[in-house]
Amino acid sequence: MIRRPPRSTLSPSSAASDVYKRQDRRIYRGVEEGMEMNSLDYSADLIRKAKDHLSTAKEGIKKILISHSNIIVECQAAIELSTKAVFKLMGVEFPRKHQLLFKHEGKEKIYDEVKKLLKKNFPKNFVYKEDIPRMVFLTYFWNYFYTLAKYGIEELNLSPDRLFREEDAKLALGHAELCVRIADNLLTWKRQEVRS
């Protein structure tokens, strides 16, 4: 329970006011620590969702009647969520949109965001730092195919499954597995940092 100074104590230097200020500082420190945990929880949730999409894609590739385009859609979601989890884990804001688009979109802005991310202090045991730019590239690459994999090309009467083949789905699956592995590994090391 938070104790407040009595209403009759208007002086900022009163003893009651000092109690209130000390409590306020403790609460602020607790909020900072809670925000760190919430960031980990938020990222863990993104990674869990990415794993769900990846699992759906893996199940889809085992089916007799495979929808290669559906596998690509699931893999794109897994890649995007994993990449956003990495940004969140490292304290870099990312767009709250379906894709990874930054303000004033353009190559320079994307490069700036990747540079900002790479300047962060990654956990010393995290071995995938050099793969981060590739991860961001894969997010943009597969996002480009997302709409095609979802809807095809209506003007040409080409359904999504007429556009994509098995090798496309397998490539997307390999990329999604890599991105999920990178994000999951970073989450593991960030959790260990918080505990120590």
Image: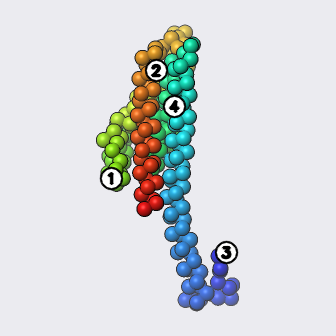
Amino acid type shown at disc 2: Ala
**Of pointers 1 and 4, the one earlier in the residue sequence:** 4
Which residue is identified by label 2?
A: 169
User: For this view, does 120 lie left or right of residue 187?
Assistant: left
Residue identifier under label 4: 54
Tell me residue 31's x, y (percent). Answer: 54, 65
Q: Who is closer to the viewer here, 194 or 15? A: 194
- Of the two numbered discs 3 and 4 in the rendering, the one whose residue sits closer to the viewer: 4
Which numbered disc, 1 or 2, marks the residue that appears first in the sequence? Answer: 1
Label located before the other in sequence (3 or 4) = 3
Badge 4 element: helix
Query: From the viewer's perspective, is 22 left or right of 142?
Result: right
Q: Earlier in the sequence, mark 2 or mark 4?
A: 4
Q: Which residue is mark 1?
A: 124
Q: How much space separates mark 3 and mark 4, taking CA atoms?
A: 45 Å
CB under 8 Å between callouts 2 and 4? no
